[in-house]
Image (cartoon, helix red, strand yellow):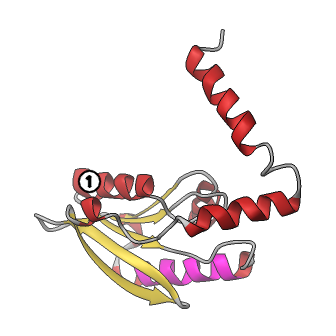
Amino acid sequence: MPSLKSHLVTLVLKHSRKKAFSSPQGLHRWIAKSRRRQTHRPPPRIAARLRISERTVHGFPVYEAAPRDRKAGDLRILYLHGGAYVFEITPFHWALIAELAERLDAHVTVPIYPLAPEHDFHAIFGMVHTVYEDVLAETPAENVVFVGDSARCNMAVVFRS
């Protein structure tokens, strides 16, 4: 039997997302509205916990994150954030990145890749492939771990195959 919480989530989604999925135009409006509130930058409370540097690949940012108070070990994580291929990385993703870096003493590479629908498969995978090659140039393959959530699990599987 569904829980009260499950019924509440269903009710909220039904009334808050229905218009967004009713037409392609509705979906594009929802994406545009959501993106105006988004930033790829790590939130200050997360940035305070990590050593973070930034570089660009194909004109898009790539963050390198590691524990602030100690040297990262040999583990290198290539983190691919979710967002249905259309949304930016969120503070929730950054919180997970911080936990991965700190708990595993890992160095985490976070590409902020091009988003659809403005960019196609080739731009998205091309940018991440370049980042992956950079990671492999610096880290033995046996020390590289892919982490992807939501839609990016697919991308993680494709690159690791």
Crowding at dot 1, Cα within 10 Å, few <14 / some 14-19 / many 20+, comes out as some
Q: Position of residue 25 (x, y in %)?
A: 85, 63
Local SS, label 1: helix
Query: In the rendered view, does 107 fall on the left or right side of 122?
Result: left
The segment highlighted magenta reads 123-136
Q: Is residue 135 left or right of residue 107?
A: right
Q: Position of residue 57 (x, y in %)?
A: 50, 88
Q: Is residue 86 visible?
A: no
Q: Camera-side residue: 60 or 24?
A: 24
Q: Disc 1 residue type? A: Leu
Q: Is residue 127 above or below residue 4?
A: below
Query: Is residue 59 left or right of 96 when viewed as pictured?
Result: right
Tell which residue pokes out farthest to the right in this image: 23
Residue at image point 43% right, 79% down:
62
Q: Is residue 64 magenta?
A: no
Residue 92 is at least partly visible in this image: yes
Figure check: 72 above or below 83: below
Name above or below for residue 64 compared with residue 59. Answer: above
Instruction: List the single residue furthest toward the top.
Output: 1
Residue 142 figure quarter: bottom left
* Residue drawn at x 30%, y 70% as measured from the top left: 65
Q: Residue at x 75, y 63 (%)?
A: 29
Q: Is residue 133 magenta?
A: yes
**Quadrant hosting residue 64:** bottom left
**In the picture, which quadrant includes the C terminus?**
bottom right
- Left or right position of 90 against 117: left
